[in-house]
Amino acid sequence: MNTVVVARLVPDLVEELNIDSSGKALDMAWVRLILNEFDDHAIEQAILLKERSGGQVTVMVADVDGADDVLYAAAAKGADQLIKLTGDWEAGSNNHALARVFAAHIRQLQPDLVLTGVQAHNDLDGALGPLLAHYLGMPYVGYVAGVQPSNGKVIVRKEYPGGLIAEMEVALPATLGIQAADQPPRYVAFSRIRQAMKTASLVEQPVAGLDPGGGPTVNRMFQPEVGQRATMLTGTSQEVAAKLIEIFRERGVL
Amino acid sequence: MAVSATSQSSTFSQTFYTSLLEIPEGERIRACLQCGTCNGICPYGYLMDFPPGKMIAALRAARFDRVTEADSVWMCVSCYACTETCPSKIPLTLGLMTRTKEELLMAGNVPAELQDALQNSQRYGNPLGESPRKRADWAKGMQPPVPIMAEIRRPVDVLWFVGDYPSYHARVQPVARAMAKILQALEVDFGILGTEESSDGDSQRLAGERGLFEMLAMKNGRVFSQYEFNQIITTDPHAYNALKNQYPALGISYPVQHYTQFLAERLDRLQPLLKREIKALVTFHDPCYLGRANGIYEEPRQVLQAIPGIELVEMSHSRSTSLCCGGGGGGMWLDGFQWEKAHVRLSEWRVREAVTAGAEILAVACPYEAPRFEDAAKMVQKAGRLVVRDIAELLVQAMSD
């Protein structure tokens, strides 16, 4: 099976997120990017498929900070081909632009299977997978938690609320939105990643241009605002406790 | 050509055995008597499929594959109890146990909890998964301010390596603040690395992640080389162990002391500052990486005894027979895994000993211990009143008017 994984780097929530001066987007100056968790599962699923039934795994990412690390870690796990799409990613991009660009590069590889994370925390709608499928003319199944090859097709597991699980057969080529791999993503020893940095070849492919058409426009982005009815208590813990007791007494709780 | 399982495993056993002979004193493994002392002294030996002695037996039988198929080596807390008691003086902790973990880790056989800590160490330079930019946040607002090397831009006498848990863990940050107060009270000319400091990597190394350890060590080494100082002191015995015994092989070599050693040398100046009595029976828990691994038993006790009012009592296991808190060798990040296997906690065993010894305060000198023992005290009968304090915290308490 020839599998292509589209991986995204998303803001790492370990760092604080701030809004830029336009009030419509994240201030990227201090943001650190991290591999989208669902995409990590998509990579793992692709490697598992290769280990079980052979084939080739290609991992494709946009050329943003941390892209090389993601690709070399994937190579250390067993990915065969690493592709970095170079271009003007600075201004950010929406799912439509991403899907058009990635689809153009994926098409040349003629994959049996295209995997990507079902969501990302900058893609809560999970639109990238369906859009990729649309541009590639493939069927799409999302929220997939397990993939098995079966007579030139794949059987995918999909989890429903209430603990129900469905299995469905999907004709290839297909695009899948991965929620979870069959097994949790493996740990790869740091020395293996260092080895991959020396031996794996990373291919850069320039993108023709990003067309954001079709995507949404953000009017305002903001931190949660303190509600009118909330009273914030300030001071030392003793002062706050004293004020709390006062309030409880007033309201007749104590 | 078909290769039978036995011949494969015998090749693997042979390669692994050879790798053990290459470490310092490694050839002593040939002198294993199969006496079983290590199996008996290991705090988790009774539930390991392969405690150290049995691992050596499997190696000699060319069936080491059986050891790596079992996952019981992840119960090893690298506490040096086996190494300490081995009559043939085989470097069991440093060699056999750690090398086995390395093999499992390279094969991707790592418990999920441990995986998180290792991944965090790779990405953020600390196992807790905190932002490296917040590494010096514990010192915010302190007066006088804690000097950060990149800001003061001058040579200092002492570079204080703060460490992961004192930098980030809510229970251990007060220990870092106490340390700063002590150094300031003693008018030590010191500085910290702040956001430039990375994990010392020692526990990651003992959990089998040698490559990660080397990466972290090199990162710290590059930062050390940018500054001028006469010596390093550490809050953490694991950091002390790394800097003293492991970094030099990577070309990173500086005089280093654990803070209890540093303070024991300055008792004449420290003692007059300790004006307030702490009237209590105190017992000291020897951390594995001060005690057994590095032979430092007296200094922490000397510092404790400088505090007026303190009466030291010893637990039934003390000094070289001390019991591990359970946090070493990756144990800090395997609590769930070890609980599932053992349904006991080493930290609770230790707290029971402190209570039996009649101690009111359990004094510690390793950043893993305060949170571990405080949690354990909640689970142990009659430990409700046991107070767990780092020596640095007790010193600051004794310094206040």
Image (cartoon, coloured by chain):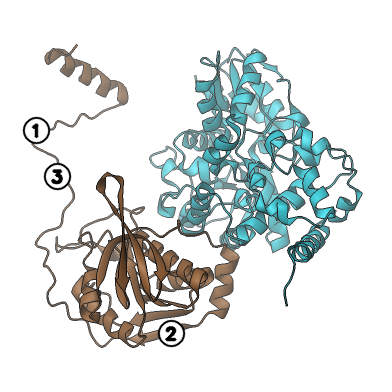
Chain colours: A brown, B cyan
Front in this rendered view, residue A190 or B400:
A190
> Which image quarter is the N terminus of chain A in?
bottom left
Is disc 3 on the same chain as disc 2?
yes
Horizontal arrangement in the rendering, residue A232 relative to residue A158 (left or right): left
Q: Nearer the viewer, residue A11 or A177?
A: A177
| SS under mark 3 | loop
Instruction: Point out residue B35 in the picture as x, y percentages from the top left corner.
Output: 88, 38
User: Of the residues shown, which amino acid type is indicated by label 2?
Assistant: Val
Q: Secondary structure at mark 2?
A: strand
Amino acid at dot 3 = Glu
Q: Chain of mark 1?
A: A
Chain of the residue on which disc 2 is drawn: A
Residue at point 73%, 44% (across, down)? B50
Q: CA distance from mark 1 to mark 2?
A: 56 Å
Compared with B132, A207 (above or below) is below
**Residue occupying the point 78% across, 37% down:** B39
Marker disc for residue A229? 1
Q: From the viewer's perspective, is residue A16 above or below residue B37?
A: below
Residue under label 3, please give it. Answer: A225
Q: Which residue, given by chain and number where applicable, does mark 2 sit on?
A: A203
Instruction: Give whichever of discs 2 and 3 has the lower sequence position.
Output: 2
Question: Picture quarter containing residue B220?
Answer: bottom right
Q: Are marks 1 and 2 in contact (CB under 8 Å)?
A: no
